[in-house]
Image (cartoon, grey):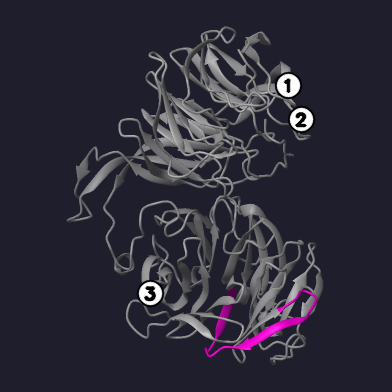
Amino acid sequence: MRRRRRLYPLALLGAIATFALLGVPVSGTRGANAGHHVTQRQVLVADLAPWRLPAPVQAAAVTALAGRIVVAGGLDSHDASSAGYAELDPGTGRLLSRGSLPDPTHDAAAAVAGGRPVVFGGGQLAPAATTQRIDASGASIAGNLPDARADLAAVTLGGRAYLVGGYDGSTRNTGVLETADGGHFTTVAQLPSGVRYAAAAGLGSTLYVFGGERNGSATAAIQAVNVQTGRARTAGSLPLPLERASAFVLGGRVFIAGGRSGTGPSADIWRFDPATGRVTPAGRLPFGVADAGAAVVGKTAYLIGGDAPQALDSAFRLRLVNRRVAPRRAGRAGRAGRGRRGTGYPFAGDLLIADRGNDRLLLVDASRHVHWRYPSPGAPAPPGGFYFPDDAFFIHGGSAILSNEEDNHTLVEIGFPSGRLLWSYGHARVPGSSAGYLNQPDDAYLLRNGDIAVADAKNCRIEILAPGGAPSSQIGTTGRCVHNPPDSLGYPNGDTPLADGNLLVSEIFGSYIDEITLGGRLVWSVHLPISYPSDPQQLGPDKYLVADYARPGGIFEFNREGQILWSYRPSSGPGMLDHPSLAEQLPSGLIAVNDDYRHRVVIIDPATGAIVWQYGRTDAPGTGPDELNTPDGFDLLTGGTTPTHPYTG
C-alpha cells in the first residue's frame, strides 16, 4: 500500500493535443506539395477530455463494460479509502453514483469477469484479499484472493480476469491468477520477478507487465505471460525504469502512458511491439500523470484521474486516427541539427518558449511538436492583453506559469494547462514605481517561501512581493541606477534564485554580477568583460553561466573572480548569436539559448560548439510551425519538475 496523500481538487479547463506517427503509409497522393509524397498514417492523438470529473479520482479501480467506465474505491478528500462506485459516461463526462462497496478500498484493481465488473484486493490500512462484484442490484463480496494483494494490475482476456503483481504487506506477489467469476482463482503462472505498481495489458493469449516497483525502486523490465501455456518470460525493457504507469491496447497495438520515472509524473507515451520487444516513442500526454486508471471504450482509451495536481479531476482521451502527412522539408533551421534519438537528448520533457514578438507562449517537445499555446481560443488573454512576454517559468510543480510582460509592465500567473488567469500585478501599459506598479519587469520567480522576486529594471530595484501580491521588501533604491549593491543597482535585469536562498543579480550598467541575500546583504560582486550581461545562472560551487545580449552575442562561463572559463561567441555564420537573452544548462549537459533576433531557440553542445537542435527558422520570423518572433525566455518541464531552476516554489 502506498503512503496516502491528501487530494487537492483543481479546476482544469481546455485541451491539448499531441500525436506521433505510427505504422506504415496506407495511401499516397500528389497535390499541392509537388514533388513531395504525401502519405496517410495512423496517428495516436492524446488530449484532455472536454469534461471534468465532478470529484477528484486517485488510486481508484477502473474498468469498462458496455460503453461505460466503472470507477470504484480510491482515496477521498480526507485520505480515507472510499467505498463508493460509479459509472462514467465517456461521451458526456457524467458520473452516476451507483452505490457503495461492502469494503472501502484503494490501490485495488478492476476487470470484467463473468460479464460483471469485479474489484480485486486493495485495502484500507493494509492489503486485503477481498474481491467485490458489481452488478445491477448492487455490490457484494465475491470471494477472496489466495493471498492479500494491493498495488496490483488486472486485465480482461476472453471474458476472464487475470491478476498480476501486487504487494501482500511484506513481499511482492509473483503468482498470476485467473478467474472466471471473481470468486474462484487458479494460478496460471509465476512472474520471473515480483513487482507492485506495474502496468499491464493483454493481447491475444499473452499478458504484458510493464515496469513497476521492485526492491524499493522502479524497474524497466517487461514481463510476458502466456495464459494458455503458463510460460512467463522477460520480453524486453522500457527505455527507463517506470512505475505507476497505465497500459492499454488500441487497434491491436500495445501502449504505455504516464507513470513515474524518478523525476515526477511522466507525460511520455510508448508503443510496445510484442514481435520484436522494441519500445518506441508514441507521443505525449498534455502533462505528466501517474496512477491513472485506464479503460478502453470502443476505439478510445481513457486515463482517469491520477497522482498529479492537474490530473485529479480530469481524464485523457487517446485515439488512433488517420492523417495525411507530408515529409517535412529541411529548412535552414533543420540543418542545424535534428537531435539524437533516446531519452533525455537533447532534453526530456517539454520546453516552454516565451515567444515575445508574437505575444504568446508555446510548449514544444524535442521532436518540435507543439503541445500547448497561450493565448488560445479556449484560454483568452487576461484583461489588458497578453503583451511582450519577456520570460515565463513553470511554478507549483508545473501546474501554473509565471510570466513577466516587460513592456506591458505586468506580471501574470496563469494555470497550466487551463490558461486561466490566477493572479496579476501591475498596470497594463502604465509604468510606475509606487505600490502596485512596475517599470519593465524582468525575470519574475516564485521563491520557496511563496514570495515573488522580480527585477524591476527601469526602477533599478529587485522587488519582493508577498504571496498576496503586496510589496514586502526591495533590494536597491528606487530610481538610483548606479552600481553600488545592495544600496543601489545599475539597471538590473536578472534575479535568479540560488540553492542557498540568495539571488544572483545581473546589472546592465557596468556589466556586474552580484549575489545578494533576500535580506539585502551583498555576498560578492564581480565585473565581467562583456557588454550586456543577461540572466546569470549557477552551474557549480564557483561556476556561473551568463548570456551577453549583443550582436554578435555570446555565452560565457565564469567564476567569482571574473575569470572566463569557457565561451561561445562565433562572429558570423549560422552559429552566430544575435542578442541572446537567456542561457541555461540542461540536464543533458547541453546549453539552451534564446537567440532573440535570429528568431530561434538553440541548443549547443559545449564540447564541440555545434548547434545540435533548434526551434524557429534562422533569421525568418513567423507564426507558423517551427517559427518564432524574438523569443526571449524559455523553461523546461520534466515530469512535474523544473530542472533548470529547482530552487523556486
Q: Amino acid at mark 1?
A: Pro
Please give the residue where the numbered disc 2 appears in the rendered image: 80
Dot 1 or dot 2, earlier in sequence: 2
Please give the residue where the numbered disc 3 appears in the rendered image: 609
Whether 263 is drawn above or below 501: the answer is above
Q: Residues within 10 Å of mark 2 (few under 14, many from 20)?
A: some
- Which residue is at the front of the view, 531 or 386? 531
Q: Amino acid at mark 2?
A: Ala
Q: Which residues are magenta?
A: 516-537
Q: Amino acid at mark 3?
A: Gly
Q: Quadrant of residue 392?
A: bottom right
Camera sees residue 293? yes
Magenta run includes residue 533 = yes
Whether 421 is drawn above or below 542: the answer is above
Q: Name the residue rendered at 59%, 51% in the picture.
A: 640
Dot 2 or dot 3, earlier in sequence: 2
Magenta run includes residue 233 = no
Q: Is residue 225 left or right of residue 110?
A: left
Q: Where does residue 626 sit, x and y in percent of width and height?
A: 39, 62
Q: Are marks 1 and 2 in contact (CB under 8 Å)?
A: yes
Q: Name the residue rendered at 47%, 39% in the picture.
A: 220
Helix, strand or loop for disc 3: loop
Q: Name the residue rendered at 45%, 71% in the picture.
A: 629
Please give the residue where the numbered disc 1 appears in the rendered image: 104
Whether 110 is drawn above or below 1: the answer is above
Q: Where does residue 268 sit, x and y in percent of width and height?
A: 48, 45
Q: Classify the position of the N terminus by image quarter.
A: top right
Q: Classify the position of the C terminus by image quarter.
A: bottom right
